[in-house]
């Protein structure tokens, strides 16, 4: 799969493309134009970025990953960074900003989001991605 060059003007968001919670978040999140472009990467499809995440030992089933300025942010740090980069437009982004604008808020609320994701996958009969399974 081909993606644009990974540079400082691109925000990469790696998420579970079969998870309804993750897909909804990705549908509505908007980053500020001054930051750059947001590129969504479905972790269920092979990609060099997912290989990089796996090589770093990050379990995509336990948290989304954002790559920005050649650094990877995982789980609560990822959602906190996205919140800081987000546009204030729309009710979704304003609620997102209110909930995740502080690192403490992200660390407290991200596990709740993860629980909702896990329940949704279980109810829908969707298996985990298990990106780390191949290296164990």
Image (cartoon, helix red, strand yellow):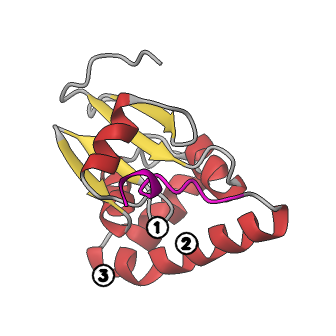
Q: Nearer the viewer, residue 97 or 41?
A: 41
> Alpha-carbon distance for marks 3 and 2?
16 Å
In the picture, residue 36 is in which quadrant? top left
> Which residue was labeled with disc 2?
114
Q: Residue at x 40, y 69 (%)?
A: 100
> Alpha-carbon distance for marks 2 and 1?
7 Å
Give coordinates of residue 47: x percent, y percent.
43, 30
> Which residue was labeled with disc 3?
104
Q: Residue at x 66, y 58 (%)?
A: 21
> Alpha-carbon distance for marks 3 and 1?
18 Å
> Which residue was labeled with disc 1?
62
Magenta span of residues? 127-136
Residue 72 falls left or right of residue 113: left
Query: CB of mark 2 within 8 Å of CB of mark 1?
Result: yes
Identify the element where label 2 is drawn.
helix
Locate the C terminus and report the quarter of the image it occupies: bottom left
Identify the element where label 3 is drawn.
helix
Q: Earlier in the sequence, mark 3 or mark 1?
A: 1
């Amino acid at each position: 799969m081909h993606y644009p060059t990974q540079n400082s003007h691109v925000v990469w968001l790696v998420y579970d493309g079969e998870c309804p919670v993750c897909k909804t978040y990705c549908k509505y999140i908007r980053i500020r134009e001054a930051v750059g472009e947001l590129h969504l990467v479905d972790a269920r499809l092979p990609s060099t970025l997912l290989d990089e995440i796996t090589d770093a030992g990050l379990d995509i089933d336990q948290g989304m990953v954002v790559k920005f300025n050649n650094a990877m942010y995982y789980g609560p740090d990822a959602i906190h960074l996205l919140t800081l980069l987000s546009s204030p437009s729309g009710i979704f982004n304003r609620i997102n900003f209110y909930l995740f604008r502080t690192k403490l808020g992200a660390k407290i609320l991200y596990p709740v989001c993860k629980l909702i994701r896990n329940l949704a996958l279980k109810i829908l009969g969707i298996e985990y991605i298990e990106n780390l399974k191949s290296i164990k």
